[in-house]
Amino acid sequence: MAEVISVVNPATETLIKEIPVDDGAAIASKVKRARAAQPAWAATPLSERIEAIKNFRNLLVEQADSLAATLTAETGKPITQAKNEILGTPLRIDFFIETVAKVITPQQVYQEPWQAMPGTGDLEEVIAYEPLGVIANISAWNYPYFVGANVFIPALLTGNAVVYKPSEIATMTGLAIASLLHKAGIPPDIFTPIIGTGLAGATLLKQPIDGVFFTGSYPTGQSIATAVAPKLIKLQLELGGKDPAYVCNDVDVPSVAAGLADGAFYNNGQSCCAVERIYVHTDSYEPFIEKFVQTVQGFKLGDPTHPETYLGPLSRKPQVSILKQQLQDAIAKGAQLLCGGQPLDRPGWYLDPTVLTDVPPEMPVMREETLGPVLGIQRVSDDAEAVALMNDTAYGLTAAVYSSKRERAVKILEQVSSGSAYWNCCDRVSPRLPWTGRGQSGIGSTLSTLGISTFLQPRGWHLKKC
Ligand code: NAD
């Protein structure tokens, strides 16, 4: 009997669907077909590739309601946030469409005047760009449209074939994305979904591919890097974070507290760039705690299909017990529970939004990626202590500083190791800026012009007239 993925609704714990997985032979055959089809796709005029991606963009908008319902059913993401993600994706697509020509156009970097070297002819030097070929896109479940589109849209626009392994937790969404891309005009062998768990991902890595673009956790990223090292192919890893925010003593505390509560708990804290640690200057500490806890307690938790729900269930069942264990440990070692942490009398993989303080910095809650509705707040006496604590992590995805003074915030952020630096904002992604990490948050960049050129390999042309 064929192996299947059982798609379970995290809010009701009921089985939605069973989807057959791809075995090794199917994966090998899909990669082979992608390889055979890719040269013709690379030779297709850019305007035609853009047209197909524009069609995909329009289909996303047209079908946003039903796509959001699917995403909510399989991941538990509140319906309003699911729709926000789907309707936010066209902004990224538009950036890629508007920018790709500039990035792939060959650049003449030198032209020798013919008079310069009589008898030797003109010399021209050009940098040209070619697609990598067939790339593996192994993806995460928490923002399947955003993190998927960050990779497969520029990869397709630049002439690559994409073999796409959606997360097993967002399989229905992965299949919906593939179906829309094909409907939009992307040939089926140029964008091929592979269905399965990590095993299917690992099998994909053994195929003759030209690059791996992975979004997921640090441990999986590390094992992927090890597995593909002998291939010497392009490797890009967008991994997790333990993102800190620091609140200085010169801000409007209530508005900062409300903004940070959203940055920490949006999508149930299941964002790579969710704020997971907050350091507050001692002068602002008490009013900050009061407003923060009040805001969190005001979040509506419950049925993710309800438009007013802000917090749904967690997408992964095991994470509920992992987080409960971390909470118990932290409380046993002296952390103060400000809110949450209570059992909920309902089916589904729910966890009450939880705020802790006085958590020793060495506790897992302050060190390991939580990827859930649990957050630690710590009092600090000055900016230097905040910098030291913000840097006390193996990750480095984003860091935020709240201050009324730009110079003060920039000076602090310059001392913190992170791919994105936020002044008076957090949990924010822009298509125009590189999305990148330091340390265990990954290697390489998506978005911005760098997130397009990453799918290309340069070629140096030395052109001499005889
Ligand atoms: P995960 O590492 O468990 O899985 C990611 C993908 O890898 C899945 O498709 C999975 O099937 C596949 N996989 C698992 N083992 C594999 C193996 N040995 N070989 C090949 N593929 C394998 O991560 P997840 O739970 O899906 O996603 C959550 C993580 O992703 C968090 O750490 C989050 O911070 C991170 N994330 C990062 C970004 C970013 O832009 N930096 C964005 C979204 C999510």
Image: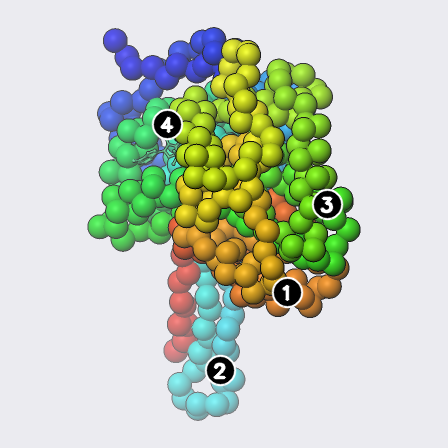
The crowd level at tag 4 (other Cα within 10 Å; few <14, some 14-19, many 20+) is many
Q: Kindly report the distance in space between the C-alpha atoms of the residues bearing marks 4 and 2.
A: 50 Å
Could you tell me which residue is drawn at 26 percent across and 32 percent down? Answer: 203
| Image depth: mark 4 or mark 2 in front | 4
State the residue position of label 1: 410
Which residue is found at the position 40% from the left and 72% from the top? 462
Judge left or right: residue 347 versus residue 160: right
In three-dimensional space, the C-alpha distance between marks 1 and 3, rounded to whole angstroms, equals: 24 Å
Instruction: Nearest to the eye among marks 3 and 2: give it.
Output: 3
Circle 4: element type: loop
**Quarter placement of the C terminus:** bottom left
Query: Which amino acid is tagged 2?
Result: Glu
258 sits to left or right of 314: right
Q: Residue at x 35, y 46 (%)?
A: 211
Q: Position of residue 83 (x, y in %)?
A: 65, 27
Residue 149 horizontal side relative to residue 8, left or right: right
Q: Is residue 165 above or below residue 48?
A: above
- How crowded pointer 1 is (Cα within 10 Å; few <14, some 14-19, many 20+) is rated as some
In the image, residue 166 lies at what x, y percent? 43, 30
Distance from disc 3 to disc 4, alpha carbons, whole Å, reads: 50 Å
Q: Earlier in the sequence, mark 2 or mark 1?
A: 2
Q: Which mark is residue 194?
A: 4
Element type where label 1 sits in the image = helix
Location of mark 2 (residue): 112
The reply to whether dot 1 and dot 4 touch (C-beta < 8 Å) is: no
Which amino acid type is shown beneath numbered disc 4? Answer: Ile
Q: Nearer the viewer, residue 249 or 143?
A: 249
Q: Earlier in the sequence, mark 3 or mark 4?
A: 4
Asked whether residue 405 is in view, the answer is yes
Residue 204 in which image quadrant = top left
Which dot, 1 or 3, sits closer to the camera?
3
